[in-house]
Image (cartoon, rainbow, N blue to C red):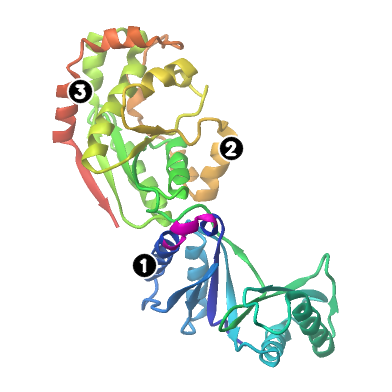
Amino acid sequence: MLQPNRIICHYGELALKGGNRNFFEKKLQENIQKKLAAFLPSPIEKIRREYGRIVIELDFPNQKDLEKIQKNLGQVFGLVNFSMAFECDLDLESIKKMAVEIFEPLENKAETFRVSTRRSNKNFPLNSEEVNRQIGAFLVEKSGQKVSLKNPDQTLFLEITEKKVFLYLKKISAVGGLPVGTAGRALALLSGGLDSPVAAFYALKRGLNVNFIHFHSRPHTSAASVEKVFELAKKLQDFQAGSKIFSVPFAQVQKQIMLNCPESLRVILYRRAMLKISEAIGRKNKAGALITGDSLGQVASQTLENLSVVGEASNLLLLRPLITMDKEEIMQKARQIGTYDISILPHDDCCTRLMPKKPELHARLDQVLEAEKNLDMEKIIQDSLEKLEIIELK
């Protein structure tokens, strides 16, 4: 059976980047190369950019390699879809010959088909519709299948470029978005729950390179939350190569807040302290933004007033990708990206420790700032920087 010898990778909004398009395409090509190199026995060296697509040349890998390639390419941000394709020369007879070879194994599986041509080479003697008609008529004659333009069992896609023609039968969906690393760096607060990994995923999708920060209350809580965060971060590694986890002890900070501040403001002050510490770590690591999994109205600390008061704690740009999403939407996305089964495992969240009986739902900034005067925030931040553990992910 004829094996595909090319992968045609398509992207969407990168094509709208005007003068910056080359930067985005180059980064996407680099990310594809890294992704494939991580699991293939020998690196694929022939990856080239053509206008509107990236072409990967295959050295006839086995079926298991093809399956791995498809799975991994589907996780590369910036790709909208890709196809396992066949390359032939830039003439009608070569196209006909290749089309028949592709269709032969399908004779008993598909009764109807259509041809869909995309012609970027305007010097080719036939336009797209003429190619569709001629190749379609030829395949009807050779295969006995019928043409159906509206609901075909099979579509033969043709891409006529400046130097070659690519033929393929299927478009495989990818995650879309922008290539990771094109939008800068960010630091995501990762709790071990459902929301924060999904928020990090959406940040990656917009081209951010994301590191993670986790606040734990060991030894007062188990090590399960840290272990979960490590597993979640590894799962998110499917969508980016190389990141760090900043693991920050938080039990002493909670104790200071509990002893010195009003009980009703306790969770708000926890979260403000987390943002202040995260900002300090982020700035040391050249992060341009912090990312949280906040969703408006989901819990007491996420009312409009409380989100505003908490967000004021950081001068670094604060991104909340899930802010208007409901829990069902977040859970559905967690299942899609593979973090759901990890997130629902039981663990001790540091913010559930020492919870107030009646948390404030509509905090005022002046009230919170007054309470915060009882804390030596500079010392808290400095102590956290000295005690944090950095875990490198590869």
Q: Looking at the image, tell me whether mark 1 or mark 2 is earlier in sequence order.
A: 1
Give the amino acid type for the residue marked by disc 2 in the picture: Glu
Residue 329: which disc?
A: 2
Above-or-below relation of 254 to 284: above
Residue drawn at x 77%, y 78% is 132
Q: Quick one: SS at disc 1?
A: loop
* Discs 1, 2 touching: Cβ within 8 Å: no
At 71% from the left edge and 85% from the top edge, which residue is drawn? Answer: 125
Magenta: predominant secondary structure element?
helix
- The stretch of residues the image draws in magenta is 16-22
Asked whether 17 falls inside the magenta stretch, the response is: yes
Q: Which of 340 and 13 is in front in this view?
A: 13
Residue position for label 3: 252
Residue corresponding to mark 1: 38
Q: In the figure, residue 166 lies in which quadrant?
A: bottom right
Q: In this view, does 209 lie to the left or right of 391?
A: right
Gap between marks 1 and 2, in whole Å?
A: 31 Å
Mark 3 vs mark 1: in front: 1
